[in-house]
Amino acid sequence: MGYYILLILAGYLIGSVNSAILLVRSKFKRDVRSAGSGNAGATNVARVFGMPTGLLTLGCDVAKALLAGLIGWAVMGRTGLMAADLGCLVGHCWPLFFHFAGGKGVAVAAGTLLALDWRMFLVIVGLFLVCVLATGRVSVGSLAGVIGFPPLYYLLHGADAALAIGTAMCLLVIFQHRKNIRRLIHGEEPRFTLRDKK
């Protein structure tokens, strides 16, 4: 149990390094949390500050989940990977270094999938892209991806502690999308469009 706690704490510190905040601050001298949707994640960065910065943010967020997950794998195997990335996800959403106001965790979840099982990563990313292209809404793709994780994991790996942790991560991402869900229900969720960078 002690190792799992340490992995969660280590993952939390890694996740608290929020690339959206750091990149926008360094390149545009602004706080991404005061622009667009106010979310410190890759989608908001791309929408407000341009696709190149958004993609760089996405890559950094995936990379930190990979780093945390691989550390967890080295210490405690698959369950350690998931424990470390659970901490990383919490850190990304509520970063210690940025007043506990961060992103929604989708890119971190993608990095977790990539570290966990490349087959699952490809299937979930494919589901995400289909949903985004069909609806024009990133939130729909994100929610479809996290909802698809538990049954896909069970199909490939069966029921274990890693599935329980992964399901908790999915619920956290869904919770972070509660405003998006409310807007979707009321038909008010905007389609993804790119503005001129500011």
Image (spheres, helix red, strand yellow):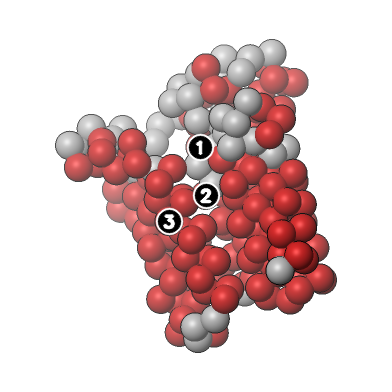
Dot 2: few (<14), some (14–19), or many (≥20) neighbours within 10 Å?
many
Residue at figure coordinates x 52%, y 74% from the top left: 163
Q: Secondary structure at mark 2?
A: helix
SS class, disc 3 = helix
Element type at mark 1: helix
Which image quadrant for residue 56? top right
Q: Which residue is at a point 44% across and 26% down the rendered structure image?
A: 37
- The first of marks 2 and 1 along the sequence is 1
The residue shown at (51%, 37%) is: 43
131 shown above or below 148 = above
Q: Most extreme residue toward the left, as rendered?
A: 186
Looking at the rendered image, the disc whose residue lies closer to the viewer, 2 or 1, is 2
Q: Which mark is residue 106?
A: 2
Q: Earlier in the sequence, mark 1 or mark 3?
A: 1
* Residue 162 appears in the rendering: yes
Q: Position of residue 125 (x, y in %)?
A: 50, 61
Q: Which residue is nearer to you in this view: 36 or 46?
A: 36
Residue type indicated by callout 3: Leu
Look at discs 1 and 3 and give the one toward the viewer: 3
- Do the residues bearing badges 2 and 1 touch, measured as CB atoms within 8 Å? yes
Which residue shows up at 55% across the image and 66% down it?
A: 165
Badge 3 or badge 2: first in the primary sequence: 2
- At label 1, the amino acid type is Thr
Q: Nearer the viewer, residue 44 or 51?
A: 44
**Residue topped by disc 1:** 43
The residue singled out by tag 3 in the image is 171
Marks 3 and 2 sit apart, C-alpha to C-alpha, by 12 Å
Q: Position of residue 24 (x, y in %)?
A: 66, 23
Quarter of the image with the C terminus is top right
Q: Position of residue 97 (x, y in %)?
A: 71, 30
